[in-house]
Amino acid sequence: MLCLRRQPGLHHHGNWRMITSCIQQASFLSFPGSAAARRKQFTERRIMGFGIEQMFDVVQDVGRYQDFLPWCHSSVVTSKGKGYLKGDLVVGIPPFVESYTSNVTLVRPQIIKAESTRGKLFNELIFIWKFSPGLKGKPQSCIIDYNVTLEFRSTIASQAANVFFNQVVRAMTEAFYNEAKRRYGPESVPSRKIEIVGSNCSSDDSSEGPRKF
C-alpha cells in the first residue's frame, strides 16, 4: 500500500534530489545486515472528523490509489472476496519504479491490514489501520491508529531511507485524509494527532511512540 506520487509540499521538507539519489543507489546495493538494522517503522494516532465507515471506505479503495496517493503510477485490484482483496501496485520515483502485490485483509469497519513481500528493495511491507469510535456525541468522528513496518533487503537501503521514510509516509497519510475531505466535505471536528505513550518505536514525531498491534 505504499504509493509514492510526488507532492509539492514534500519538496520543502528536504532535498528532493538527495532523496531520489539515495533511492536509486539503494536499489543497486544489497548488503543484508541484521533484520533489525533493515527495519523501519512509522506509527501515528489521529482523531478524524469523519465516521468509521467513511474512513474505512477510503482506505480500502485500492483500485483508486493511483488517483489520490503520492507517487502511485498504477493500482489494480486483481481479486476480491469477503474480507480480502489483492492488488497490484506500481510506485516510485523514475527511473526507480517498484512493482509489488498487496494482500489486504478487511475486517469491516475496524481493521485493514495490507501485506506485501518480494519487492526489489524490501522483504516485507505491512500497513495496519485500526478504526475506533471518536468523540462522544460526534458520530461522524473516529480515531485511526496507523502503523507501517518496512523491512529493506539491505542495510544500505535502510540507511538511505533515513533521509525520506517519515516524510514519504506522512505525505501518504495526509493524502488519505485529504481524499476523505474531497469525498465527504468538511470535517465534523478538526483532525489532529493524539499522543501515543508507552513505546520505544519511532514515528514522524519524536514525542510519540507506537501502539502495540
Image: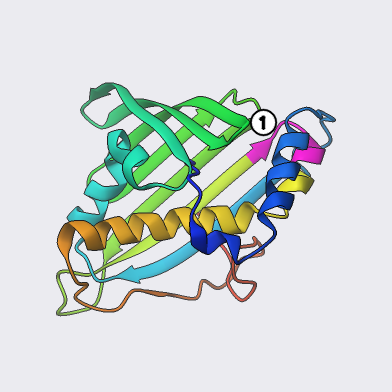
- Region rendered in magenta: 151-157
Q: Does the magenta stretch include residue 155?
A: yes
- The residue tagged 1 is 121
Against 131, residue 135 (above or below) is below
The x and y percentages for residue 2 are 49, 41
The x and y percentages for residue 88 are 41, 24
Q: Tag 1, which secondary structure?
A: loop
Please state which of residues 12 and 201 is positioned toward the viewer in this rendering.
12
Please state which of residues 42 and 181 is positioned toward the viewer in this rendering.
181
Residue 206 image-quadrant placement:
bottom right
Q: Is 92 on the left-hand or right-hand side of 15?
A: left
Against 152, residue 142 (above or below) is below
Instruction: Give the farthest residue toward the top.
Output: 78
Q: Is 68 on the left-hand or right-hand side of 7?
A: left
Residue 67 image-quadrant placement:
top left
Task: Count neighbours of disc 1 (C-alpha within 10 A) and say few if under 14, some if 14 to 19, many if 20 or more.
Answer: many
Q: In which quarter of the image is the N terminus?
A: top left
The amino acid type of the residue labelled 1 equals Leu
The x and y percentages for residue 64 are 29, 38
Q: Which residue: 61% across, 42% down?
A: 150
Q: Is residue 164 magenta?
A: no
Q: Which residue: 17% across, 66% down?
A: 185
Please state which of residues 36 and 213 is positioned toward the viewer in this rendering.
36
The answer to whether one can see residue 1 in this image is no
The x and y percentages for residue 19 are 69, 50
| Number of on-image labels | 1
